[in-house]
Amino acid sequence: MLGDNSMSDQLIIFDTTLRDGEQSPGASMTRDEKVRIAKALERLKVNVIEAGFPAASDGDFESVQAVATAVSESVVCGLARALERDIDRAAQALANAKQFRIHTFIATSPIHMQNKLRMEPEQVVEMAVKAVKHARQFTDDVEFSPEDAGRSDPDFLCHILEAVIDAGATTLNIPDTVGYSVPGEFGPMIAQLIERIPNADKAVFSVHCHNDLGLAVANSLSAVLHGARQIECTINGLGERAGNASLEEVVMAVKTRKDVFSCQPRIDTKEILSCSRLVSSITGFPVQPNKAIVGANAFAHESGIHQDGILKNRETYEIMKAEDVGWTANRMVLGKHSGRNAFRARMADLGEEFATEEALNRTFARFKALADKKHEIFDDDLQALISSSSGDEVNEVVKLVSLHVCTETGETPEARIVLTIDGEEKSATAQGSGVVDATFMAIEHIVHSHSQLLLYSVNNITSGTDAQGKVTVRLEKDGRIVNGKGAHTDIVIASAKAYLNTLNRLYSTEPRQHPQSAV
Ligand code: KIV
Ligand code: ZN
């Protein structure tokens, strides 16, 4: 993947949903969830999958290792601070990958060097060069990022980037870490770097934009127009704070405007929607209806004038085809009478393979229970079913045994819940402003988690009043933020399941090192 930058007609898509995406508050994923997303990204044909930051914790290390083993068509990348121990850890985690990259970084803006690193600029250059040389002992594919490049001095950037190319970096990623840049300056900055750095032709220039001002996609596209040939992005624009550039928006902008962009990604766009839904269902981050490309309204034409135009000639109001990004009708695929083979085959179409017969049987039993309540089972129901089965991986300390709720006009809603904690049965009754509030209070009477509820959201998975409700709960305790989810045709039960799933995740997550904390 050596760089000829603006001459190359390939746009490399580097997906960081599993790393920067996971840095969204509460978006932490289990190892199996990461593997499911990585396989979906591979089907999407992204060039590089940043699988995580292996030095963060043993769990992060194992997740990167599992992704490295599961994926063969995309390069698997691990993030490492410019420290030998981080790089060694990344190399160990990636050792089984068919193709792997080490991505090392250090901050270069005056504000980061002075306040976070407390280092002189020349010390930073020395560390960067040392890190790149060290990483090159494990692989020829080494990426370097000057963190907070958007607020760094261009002369210093030229100096450090020239030095790391000499040390062996093959991709230079320019991050707008705090989302401060605007397209009119960010693109020209990339052009300037490519022009001024004497050995720029030996590396691919990449960009990594954050969305604090809502400009991540615009900045990324401006960079491509000025010679960048890799974009770092995430599914649904997930990422630290306001998120990263959204993969689906970047890809469809470049594909739709081939007249403007001279380079193209290899992405299989028909996989975009299912990948977006998978990420949303695993992380519990719903996609807003008016989100470009993957939002429910993205291809919905409401006004009569628009519909008339579309019927006469779809191009009147449509610049892309809905089916090109995977919006075929959400088919009724299975029902109550469907057998195990039909179920297994449809799951395989969705990219879900069962490791054992037992795993298949467990999920099939859940499918049958759902089909008894809801006669038409759609692909999205199946995805939710897998997401709730993958909760099996979370150590379930607290389990729901039964829930009884009572609500009547003019009366205070009440919930009685029975749980097991480490196998021991406990029950409680509570009143609340509604049945969900009462249910959460009853749970808290038993568990006393002393956590704070940051978010409660309910979305329907498919349409109709028999649809499953998909509930996301976000809790905070001692600075740790965790999301959990639950799905059920009864939204009060879905809410209880989501609350318990969040508690179980809170109890089972280990402390992790944030990659962008001081070295
Ligand atoms: O935003 C950022 O600067 C990052 C780096 C680690 C590449 O995520
Ligand atoms: Zn970032």
Image (spheres, rainbow, N blue to C red):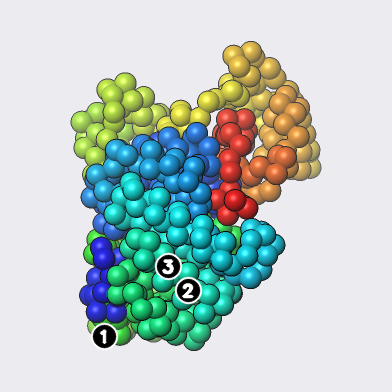
Say what secondary structure mark 2 lies in.
Answer: helix
Residue 204 at x, y percent in the picture: 32, 69
Q: Is tag 3's residue or tag 1's residue first in the polypeptide sequence?
A: 3
Left or right of 481? Residue 446 is right
Residue 404 at x, y percent in the picture: 64, 27
Dot 3 alpha-carbon crowd within 10 angstroms: few under 14, some 14 to 19, many 20 or more: some
Please, what is the three-letter code of the amino acid marked with disc 3? Ala
Mark 1 CB in 8 Å range of ligand 2?
Answer: no
Q: Distance between the residues labelled 2 and 1?
A: 35 Å
Left or right of 457? Residue 322 is left
Residue 159, label in figure: 2
Please, what is the three-letter code of the amino acid marked with disc 2? His
Dot 1 alpha-carbon crowd within 10 angstroms: few under 14, some 14 to 19, many 20 or more: few
Q: How far apart are marks 3 and 1 (CA)?
A: 36 Å
Please, what is the three-letter code of the amino acid marked with disc 1? Asp
Q: Is residue 119 visible?
A: yes
The vertical placement of 145 against 444, above or below, is below
Taking the spot 29% from the left edge, 31% from the top edge, the residue there is: 354
Quarter location, residue 367: top left
**Is the Cβ of the residue at disc 3 closer than 8 Å to that at disc 2?**
yes
The vertical placement of 292 against 313, above or below, is above
Taking the spot 23% from the left edge, 50% from the top edge, the residue there is: 73
Residue 446 at x, y percent in the picture: 72, 24
Q: Is tag 2's residue or tag 1's residue first in the polypeptide sequence?
A: 2
Left or right of 150? Residue 208 is left
Quarter location, residue 483: top right
Residue 259, label in figure: 1
Mark 3 CB in 8 Å range of ligand 1?
Answer: no
- Label 3, on which residue? 163
Say what secondary structure mark 1 lies in.
Answer: loop
